[in-house]
Amino acid sequence: MKSYLEVGRAALKLTDESNILESGIEIEVQPPGKKLQNMSLLSGGEKALTAIALLFAILQIKAPPFCILDEIEAALDDVNVARFADYIKMYSDNTQFIVITHRKGTMEAAKTVYGVTMEEYGVSKLVSMKLK
């Protein structure tokens, strides 16, 4: 995997520590070069990166056999889409990823791509490609 020099920080906090089972979770995030803030104050791309980082942290602890992601990287810029694709590749040894996306960078990282086309009005056709 590529090395990324800039590192952010994040913390998960219970909103009501006296009632753990019904408590909410507050996510505080500090992207590289920014001050610590609540996740609701972040941009769409920063929120997406935070969610993706949390997902990969969970996958590190206990990897499921498969994971379905629906346009999780839609708000990211091209550089971060490439980073996301690198992580998908790295974690794909233990987890099979099914990624629904329109992003070119994510599709380029795939081993197999499935698509739906409509050559004739009202008739959908499934297309697949294995990439090497």
Image (cartoon, helix red, strand yellow):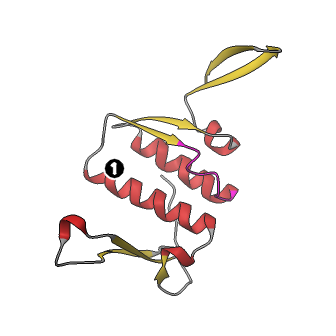
Split into 4 quadrants, where in the image is the C terminus? top right
Q: Which of the two residues, 45 or 110, is positioned nearer the viewer here?
A: 45
What residue lies at 30% left-to-right and 39% top-to-bottom? Answer: 64
**Residue situated furthest left in the rendering:** 18
Q: Helix, strand, or loop for circle 1?
A: helix
Above or below, 40 against 99 in this view is below
Above or below, 52 against 26 in this view is above
Above or below, 48 against 84 in this view is below
Quarter holding residue 65: top left
Q: As drawn, is 14 to the left or to the right of 116? A: left
Above or below, 132 against 30 in this view is above
What residue lies at 48% left-to-right and 65% top-to-bottom? Answer: 50
> In the image, residue 122 lies at what x, y percent?
78, 15
Identify residue for label 1.
Answer: 59
Q: As drawn, is 122 to the left or to the right of 10? A: right
What residue lies at 81% left-to-right and 14% top-to-bottom? Answer: 119
Q: As drawn, is 124 to the left or to the right of 19? A: right
> In the image, residue 90 lies at what x, y percent?
43, 45
> In the image, residue 130 lies at what x, y percent?
59, 21
Q: Main secondary structure of the magenta part?
A: loop
Residue span colored magenta: 70-77
> In the image, residue 13 lies at what x, y percent?
30, 76
Residue type at tag 1: Leu
Residue 53 forms part of the magenta stretch: no
Other-residue count near label 1 (Cα within 10 Å), few / some / many at <14 / 14–19 / ≥20: some
What residue lies at 64% left-to-right and 58% top-to-bottom? Answer: 76
Q: Which of the two residues, 62 or 6, is positioned nearer the viewer here?
A: 62
Q: As drawn, is 21 to the left or to the right of 54? A: left
